[in-house]
Image: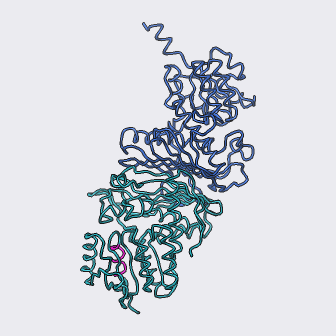
Amino acid sequence: MRNRREKRVVSRLFNLAIIGCGDFGTRHAEALCRVPTARLVAVADVNAKRAERLARSFGAGTTSVDAMCSRADIDGVILATPTDTHHTLTLAATNAGKHVLVEKPVALSLRELNEIQGAAAAAGTLLMVGQSLRFQKVPQALHRAAREGDVGQPVYFNWVSDSARAWPGGWRAWQTQPARSGGMALHLGVHGIDLALWLLDSAPERVYAQGANLASPELEVYDSLQIGIRCANGSNALIELHLNLPAANASYQAAFLLGTRGQAQWALPDDGLYIGRGGARLLADADDRSLSDELAHFVDCCQHRREPSISATQVRWVLATALAANLSLQSGEAIAVGDVPGSAGS
Amino acid sequence: MKCLGLLLLGCVRHQRLYTEHFASLPGVRIVAVADEPDIPAWMHEVNQEFADRYAVPYLRDVAAALQRPDVAMVSVCSEPTRHASLATQAAHAGKHIWVDKPMVTTVADADTLIAAVDAAAVKLSYVHRLYSPALQDARRRLDRGEIGLPQALHLSFVSTGSVTSGAVEDFQLVVDPGLSGGGEFMNFLGYPVDTVRYLTGQEVTRVYASAGSYFFAPHREHGVEDFGMVFLTLEKGIIATIVVGRSPTPNHPTGGDYTLRLHGTAGTLIVDENHPVVTIHAEPPARSAHSLSEAIIAPLVEEFVARVREDRQPLRTMRDGRVVIGVIEAAYRSLASGQVEPVPRSEAP
């Protein structure tokens, strides 16, 4: 006969709610279907119709943020809303004792981050940032190459993401409004920045960034960025983002990790050819479970009181680096990461 | 066809490659090797080997060699810090000048050389990679507007393999600043900087750099960089990044990563200078079946000799060399300051 206590512990599903039922909220709901330890119980969105649609599709209920916070049966919250709402909503959920998985970027400033990390520490809840790229196969392979010594000590990392020129949503997209998204360095830059600091395994020290207008000069943000990171251990990273490809489905991504004993590299497409008007389609990983793996990791960390692999320190490093890149773009100068407002050194 | 006599001034580093291409051209004859008397004994030995190979005299007197009437051109391939002095003497003697990279190791040296070359009205070309088939193809595609206006560029120039792989006789020629003028920035950075200028037609205005001695003991011992990244701001709002240096990556099939990504207003061009390539996987390990250096140097040597005959300027002149060393100097200033450094826009005298 099964031990009753053990059965209760093992079979107790982790109840999650999603705030924000847009593109990424929907992807989280889909990914949750493949996480056997958790279930979606409620969704919320400022757009009631959007929330109802998502709730219906995944057998969850709709709720409000306030009601969600006061519900005892909700263990954790996935926050997939525009970045300018992260601070307020994360604080609300955390102060209500909920674990929070917040989409990247975590916040718009280090002061906001200080407050939400402080609140999580006080509440004893988990705060994890959704750097889902880390759970994809290529970054995982690069990380193994770095940690298992295949390439020796990593000294340089380059990440390139080149995609379609028009932002989905056009002028309505909050992602292109600096006040809401923090601009490209925060909204998209944190992907490569997080990979860089994870692979180079060092604190960022100095950041230099330059931008250009490729295909959409009317945007308030650059659509082309080159971000240079100098780490405390002397290693360097170069993160490149470009939004200029003429076909909506066109994409080019590349990664290059150089170590003291070798290098690891990847590119898609990798035929070394011209990506022009026809566009080249990024070959999607046919079995990409990165978002499910990220959610499973979040649930596992909540249930077993573990620190996420995306550590609180790394979360600070990544945001500080992206903010330093913005300061560099504004001033045209290299920025010491310790000088970013809200950092311990500033 | 008039026979053009070539005098070899210094025979270290890549002189063998250059001389082979010069010697293969009709109407070009190696007539002598010359160098200063007070250079190290091993350099005299290398010079003597070249003289023996081509059955020409080795003269330990540069001035006397430059007075020979059968010398029309010189190929300067000494340690880089002596390029300027040897090339300037050749200009004063009215000889056309082929000079290894870097053309000179300071802007001040470039100014001296430019004055001498202008006064003598001779031709000067330095070694660059702009005739690389992939770069030529990229330039044609850019000029056709295939990706619109190039606004953001990335270039990688990373040679792989051991420092003792034999590209130069003595690695001190690369790492001892007294001989080389600097580290791998001085050695290699001119290539991608010139490529950015060639592809965009614009000049560099600001430079930021971050580098280190990551891989090789000789670089560490001399306090010079073996690898680093360089950010360039150019006119017309163009931005560029360059990673440059030498890495110990073993068994690299093409001996290095020489790649470009050109992001334009209407598309992106990805260029691998080693492509298309035939790679051979066998013993010894994977290797490329073609020589990129030969594909680049052969047309460059041909161009220089043709320009001398036609009395026309080559694709790259000493004024380009001066601009390039100005950018390299700014990169070194940035390494020292940790800040962005402007590139002075002064004109050559």
Report the residue at 48% width, 55% height from top: B243
Residue A260, placed above or below residue B30: above
Q: Give the range drawn in magenta.
A: B15-23
Residue A22, placed above or below residue B346: above
Q: In which quarter of the image is residue B66?
A: bottom left
Horizontal arrangement in the rendering, residue B204 relative to residue B187 (left or right): right
Q: Residue B89: x and y, percent?
A: 42, 80
Q: Residue A165: x and y, percent?
A: 65, 53
> How has the structure been colored for display?
by chain
Residue A134, placed above or below residue A298: below
Q: Does the magenta segment cover residue B20?
A: yes
Horizontal arrangement in the rendering, residue B32 relative to residue A285 (left or right): left
Furthest residue in direction bottom, as rendered:
B1
Report the residue at 71% width, 18% height from top: A67
Q: In which quarter of the image is the C terminus of chain A?
A: top right
Residue A51, placed above or below residue B273: above
Residue A156 visible to an observer of this rendering = yes
Report the residue at 44% width, 62% height from top: B186
Chain B: its colour in the image is cyan
Chain A: its colour in the image is blue
Q: In which quarter of the image is the N terminus of chain A?
A: top left
Q: Residue B141: x and y, percent?
A: 57, 68
Q: Does the magenta segment cover residue B64?
A: no
Q: Toward the viewer: A181 or A345?
A: A345
Horizontal arrangement in the rendering, residue B323 relative to residue B96 (left or right): right
Q: Residue A294: x and y, percent?
A: 53, 31
> How many numbered circles are shown?
0
Q: Toward the viewer: A269 or B187?
A: B187
Q: In which quarter of the image is residue B78?
A: bottom left
Magenta stretch secondary structure, dominant: helix
Residue B263 visible to an observer of this rendering = no
